[in-house]
Amino acid sequence: MSIFRNVINKLQGATHQALKYCTIVENQTKAQDIVPIISKVQYDDENSLYQKSRQVWLENLDTIKEKKLGFVTLHPHIFAATPRIDIIHQNVRWQKMYRWVCYAHTKTRTEVRGGGRKPWPQKGTGRARHGSIRSPLWRGGGRAHGPRSPTPHFYMLPFFTRVAGLTSMLSVKLAQDDLHIINNLEIPTSECSYIEQLVEERNWGPSVLIVDSYDIMPKNITLATDEIKHINLMPVYGLNVYSMLKHNTLVLTEQAARLIEEKLLFQLNRSDFRRLMVPFKLSQH
């Protein structure tokens, strides 16, 4: 009986610890074992650059808390160009205008119903000469020089103005600390709350544009951002000035940043620009 009493007393004196669940995976690696990633590219014009290359932190997406994985070196002609607000405005206006079609429509005198015969004889009545009651001079008649639908407002912006708009917008995003480079788009879950908590934890803007080098992206991040209207995914070939300006934060994968550099540096230094501009010239003959 005494043995049983001792067992009961020990059980009553034991402390009960509640189980705690956490989705954050703690890194058990020691600080001296972490090797930072230094992503640097040898540029052809590195010896003739007037500005230093820009360095950006390489971040992660697999945890809500931000981790600095290393440095990414970026070309100053792409990410440190002189910001031209006028060129950015030209690009935004061009993108708005080329997809705007005006459907305002008015009828001419040939399309208005009625007015087939001459209202009165040409001579002898003393009144003005008229050939139809559907003339623009008459009430209920046709409209002269009115809008005709569909009216497109498409025009072509010069090629290098479009290139300068991309470099200016990327430089503005980096200068305002709204440009982030990540290693990949892998996240541990497909829940929308994970992305929302990540954006809030890292103090990103309300709207985020995530750009990858390829249009087929990981399943988890595709499902997680599908129902969030202010967080969008985009491949590199769809990157444009209007989308970057509309979103507060621009997130690029490392591969996307390198591909943007490669494409824009080629366009900025190409020697066949005269042949490139021939299709856009107006014929004077």
Image: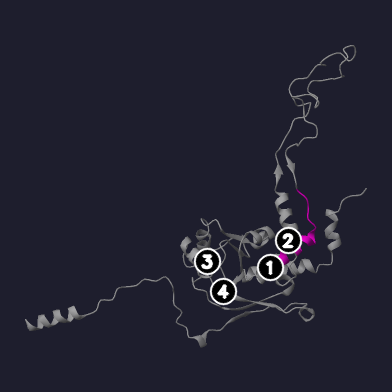
Q: In which quarter of the image is the N terminus?
A: bottom left
Label 4 environment density (alpha carbons within 10 Å; few <14, some 14–19, many ≥20):
many
Q: What segment is highlighted magenta in the picture? A: 154-168
Q: Are marks 4 and 3 in contact (CB under 8 Å)?
A: no
Which tag, 4 or 3, sits closer to the chain's start?
A: 4
Q: What element carries label 1?
A: helix
Label 3 environment density (alpha carbons within 10 Å; few <14, some 14–19, many ≥20):
some
Which residue does the image show at 39% across and 71% down from the upper left? 22
Residue at mark 2 to residue at mark 4: CA–CA distance: 28 Å
Q: Is residue 83 visible?
A: yes
Q: What element carries label 3?
A: helix
Q: In this view, which residue lies farthest toward the bottom?
A: 32
Residue at mark 1 to residue at mark 3: CA–CA distance: 20 Å
Which tag, 2 or 4, sits closer to the chain's start?
A: 4
Q: Which mark is residue 199?
A: 3
Which tag, 1 or 3, sits closer to the chain's start?
A: 1
For disc 2, the marked residue is: 88
Which tag, 1 or 4, sits closer to the chain's start?
A: 4
Residue at mark 1 to residue at mark 4: CA–CA distance: 20 Å
Q: In this view, which residue lies farthest toward the top?
A: 124
Which tag, 1 or 2, sits closer to the chain's start?
A: 2
Which residue does the image show at 87% across and 51% down from the upper left? 282
Q: Are marks 1 and 2 in contact (CB under 8 Å)?
A: yes
Q: What residue type is labelled 4?
A: Glu
For disc 1, the marked residue is: 172
Which residue does the image show at 86% across and 16% down from the upper left? 127
For disc 4, the marked residue is: 59
